[in-house]
Image: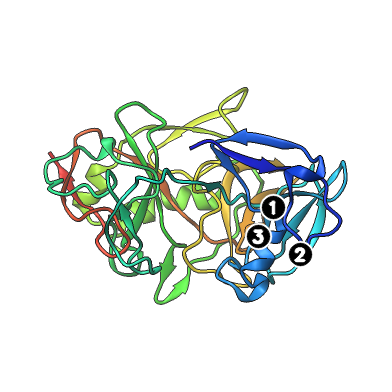
Amino acid sequence: MDSKWNVSEMSDTSKPPSSEDGGTIVETPVGLLNVYEYNMTGGSNSYLNNSLYWWTITANSSSTNYIVSYDGSIGTLGVTNGRGIRPVVNLNHDIKIVAGDGSSDNPYRLEGDNDNNLSGTLLNTRYSGEYISFGIGENNLYRIVSHETEGLTKVVLSGELRENGSRKNMPWGNDSTYLGSNVVNFINGEYLTSGNYLTSEQVNMIEDNTTWYLGTDKNNAEIVNSKVGLLRRRELMAGQFNIHYYNANYYVLTENGQLRVFAIYARDELNNIDAKIGAGSIKPAFNLKQNVIITGGDGTLQNPFQIALE
């Protein structure tokens, strides 16, 4: 439902923002938390402290906003910088809980969001964020990103690619371009053919030729084509971590130039690392074919979709 959000500058964050203070109120379906709400939950000691950087809705000046830092503390930052986004909504009063207990392992499922008997349903009808059982061993969980190409389902490895219990890290390559990348050669070679990461049946479910955009979006971006790629900077799910490692970072598709490549760090920071000597982790992404169907599961972390070719 539409909600009212106070987006006024605040110097005293110990009290809630109020429309009576003559502040700026906007009415939209989606907003952000204000600093007072964060503090009232317990701040750094609350569940809202997720070890990442993210914006609040509260302005500190005409050019700075309050942010929550990776350690849960409140700080300020110029609004032209990049930090994480945690959308906030108010749900309509008549929405009903139909499953779950509200815990992180068993979240509430709402009426209209508790589909069952999905066997035979095309995967390309499902939603961003849902989980898929795909891959081998410790790399057997993927998530739906989008349906950017009509009929296809873009998915990404839920965590970072692992090998023998550790993250598989490698330098990008001899230059910062996509086609000159060791990483891209690996995910379109050994990753597909070795049998260590995917079964032959799963490889057959992957669309053979996907278009990848080397810019932050499709507009005016260089285009390359390959079976497997990476998510681009700012793409949905690009900053997603299931597990937060202090020193983790993984590559994104967007080129940076000057022998450096963009990577997303575990605290949700965008940074860049030396293409030749920096060691980043890998989150392979690809499109699943339009005739991939669901054979079991409900798309949750505890019960991911099982899939097969129709």
Q: Please, what is the three-letter code of the amino acid marked with disc 3?
A: Glu
Q: Please, what is the three-letter code of the amino acid marked with disc 1?
A: Thr
* Residue at figure coordinates x 28%, y 65% from the top left: 302
Expressed as whole percent of the image width and height from the top left, the position of residue 178 reads: 57, 41
Left or right of residue 59: residue 305: left
Asked if 303 appears above or below 262 in the picture, the reply is: below
Q: Which residue is mark 3?
A: 37
* Residue at figure coordinates x 62%, y 40% from the top left: 4
Q: Earlier in the sequence, mark 3 or mark 2?
A: 3
Mark number, residue 74? 2
Describe the element under mark 1 as helix, strand or loop: strand
Q: Earlier in the sequence, mark 3 or mark 1?
A: 3
Q: Nearer the viewer, residue 122 or 224?
A: 122
Left or right of residue 118: residue 195: right
Is residue 33 something one can see in this rendering? Answer: yes
Q: Which residue is mark 1?
A: 56
Q: Are marks 1 and 2 in contact (CB under 8 Å)?
A: yes
Density class for disc 3 (Cα within 10 Å; few <14, some 14-19, many ≥20) is some
Expressed as whole percent of the image width and height from the top left, the position of residue 73 reads: 74, 69
